[in-house]
Image (spheres, helix red, strand yellow):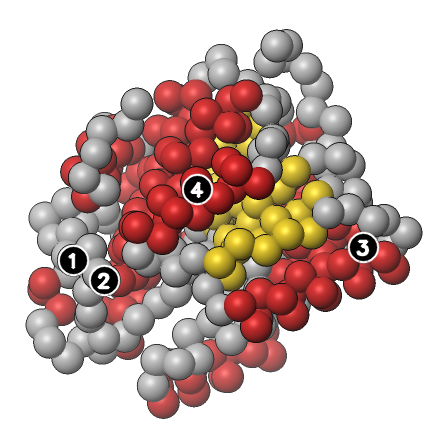
Amino acid sequence: MDHESTWSGLPGKQVLLTGATSGIGLAAAKAMAGRGAHVALVARDRARGEAAAAAVRQAAASAGEQPRVELFLADLSVQAEVRQLADEVRRRLPALHVLVNNAGAVYSRRHVTADGLEATWALNHVAPWLLTDLLLERLRASAPARVITTSSDAGLLAQLPFDDLEARGWGQRGSVWQGFRRYGQSKLANVAFTVELARRLDGSGVEAFCFHPGLVATNFNMSNGRLARSSMVALKPFARSPEKGAETLLWLADSPKVRGLSGGYFADCRARSIPRGARGDAPARLWAVTEQQVGRLIA
């Protein structure tokens, strides 16, 4: 296989998107299908997933396209469901050219998942790490391919929480501030993951990118109590639309211009400096820690 082939854009490509039932994920899915990509959506709720799939089909039809649009169901905070999702993807999708790790959340109160991990960390970092790992063979076989992970500038001043991976320092009550701090740590982890993934995939034909979508007007952080909801409402006049927030994601998935920039962090369709906390030995150290958290070593 010629891993040096020029990226030919989205038409005919198979894309898998998590966090695709609303916000920038849904906006990106519609745009990708409108450009002729075959789109597979991952949703936690069947009704919302089916509604999103219908909206993507309608958007594609309006653009004169008729791609395949498929739906997968999984709670990505639960490792067993991530593994089941990967098994189903391998059964149903003979190729995978673009994997978009977009699902994420922020919680103002600390709670743990079925796997015993703090929920923000489990969903925002461990889930994309595990899903990507489980689908790497399919991505390599489909190369050239891309892995794109939604990060955030919330991680710019963060540090990876190697001394408190389970956020026990929160105590029992938690707060909006502690929740946002933890969110920033998980978003920094997305960058470190991308840096190390790119290093490990060098020469394989699979490239890895992450990006900051900007402040986007969605339902994000609206269920974390009155203070969080009020803050998001106050920021809404300054926020961009989901379609605008999805532009960099769409560009990373479609453009041949980012070839050779694997491991990069992007915003507004431009490369950004890697945050300080994701430099040096931090990416490799995080990788080793995450291997332990999923209870297996990467092949």
The reply to whether residue 219 is in sight is yes
Badge 1 marks a residue whose secondary structure is: loop
Label whose residue precedes the other's in the sequence (1 or 4): 4
Residue 207 can be seen, yes or no: no
Binning the other alpha carbons within 10 Å of mark 4 as few (below 14), some (14 to 19) or many (20 upward) gives many
Q: Are marks 1 and 2 in contact (CB under 8 Å)?
A: yes
In the image, is residue 49 above or below residue 267? Answer: below
Q: Nearer the viewer, mark 1 or mark 4?
A: 4
Q: Which residue is mark 3?
A: 60
Earlier sequence position, callout 4 versus callout 3: 3
Measure how far apart labels 1 and 2 are at the Cα level: 5 Å
Residue picked out by circle 4: 86
Whichever of callouts 3 and 1 sits on the residue coming sooner in the sequence is 3
Q: Which mark is residue 116?
A: 1
In the picture, measured across the screen, residue 21 lies left or right of residue 133, that is right
Quadrant in the rendering for residue 244: bottom right
Q: Position of residue 85 (x, y in %)?
A: 44, 48
SS for callout 2: loop
Q: Quadrant of residue 76?
A: bottom left
- Kindly identify the residue that appears in the image at 20 percent across and 69 percent down: 111
Image marks 4 and 2: residues in contact by CB distance under 8 Å: no
